[in-house]
Image (spheres, helix red, strand yellow):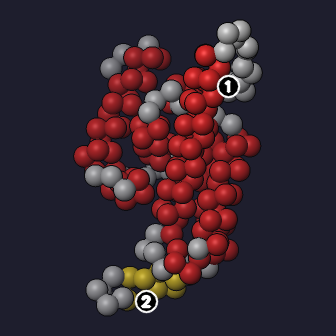
């Protein structure tokens, strides 16, 4: 990676797709896994996001933080998965005879509870705890205000503490 100074005095980072992939894929898999509850699905989402970056590399490579762009694509894909699952659950509830739906059990009770939060709250928690990102970085990735990130993180922590029986 090398850097040049742009017309506004900002540093322009010149990164190859291979460098981006090597430096970001594990973190993006972890985030997607935490949001989907399934390692294979998380890896699939992360690789789809990377494929999207590769296909749009001419534009993505010019961004200040291409890794943030890939994270956003992965989180959007997780949102689509959640929406589809919600529609499927509603459709199953309307069936006259309810069938049992096999769900992959996950060993970590905490992340099970995280996945019951709104996608925004779950995304903020995953980016904060898996990626160790600051409020400002999370706001940039999710394209929301820093106050919204703080509020989402606070609400998520309260909800998780209540559900897990942890005293605050």
- Circle 2: element type: strand
- Where does the N terminus fall, quadrant-wise? bottom right
- Where does the C terminus fall, quadrant-wise? top left
| Residue situated in front as seen by the camera: 90 or 134 | 90
The residue sitting at the top extreme is 97
Q: Earlier in the sequence, mark 1 or mark 2?
A: 2
- Residue 70, x across and y down, in percent: 55, 61
Q: Residue at x 47, y 43 (%)?
A: 123
- Residue 94, x across and y down, in percent: 61, 16
Q: Is residue 25 left or right of residue 83?
A: right
* Residue 137 seen from this side: no
* Residue 104 seen from this side: yes
| Residue situated in front as seen by the camera: 137 or 93 | 93
Q: Is residue 95 left or right of residue 126?
A: right
| Residue situated in front as seen by the camera: 56 or 8 | 56
Question: Which mark, residue 107?
Answer: 1
Above or below, 116 against 15 in this view is above
- Circle 1: element type: loop
* Image-quadrant location for residue 99: top right
Residue indicated by mark 2: 4
Above or below, 69 against 120 in this view is below
| Residue situated in front as seen by the camera: 16 or 52 | 52
Above or below, 79 against 93 in this view is below
* Image-quadrant location for residue 155: top left
The residue sitting at the left extreme is 147
Alpha carbons under labels 1 and 2: distance apart: 46 Å
């Amino acid at each position: 990676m090398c850097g040049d100074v742009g017309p506004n005095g900002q540093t322009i980072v010149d990164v190859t797709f291979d460098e981006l992939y090597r430096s970001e894929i594990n973190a993006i898999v972890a985030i997607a896994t935490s949001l989907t509850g399934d390692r294979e699905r998380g890896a699939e989402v992360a690789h789809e996001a990377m494929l999207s970056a590769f296909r749009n590399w001419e534009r993505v490579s010019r961004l200040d933080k291409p890794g943030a762009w890939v994270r956003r694509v992965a989180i959007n894909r997780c949102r689509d998965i959640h929406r589809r699952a919600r529609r499927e659950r509603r459709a199953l509830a309307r069936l006259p005879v309810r069938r049992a739906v096999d769900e992959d059990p996950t060993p970590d009770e905490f992340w099970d509870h995280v996945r019951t939060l709104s996608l925004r709250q779950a995304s903020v928690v995953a980016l904060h705890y898996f990626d160790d990102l600051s409020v400002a970085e999370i706001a940039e990735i999710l394209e929301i205000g820093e106050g919204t990130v703080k509020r989402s993180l606070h609400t998520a922590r309260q909800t998780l503490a209540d559900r897990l029986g942890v005293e605050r």
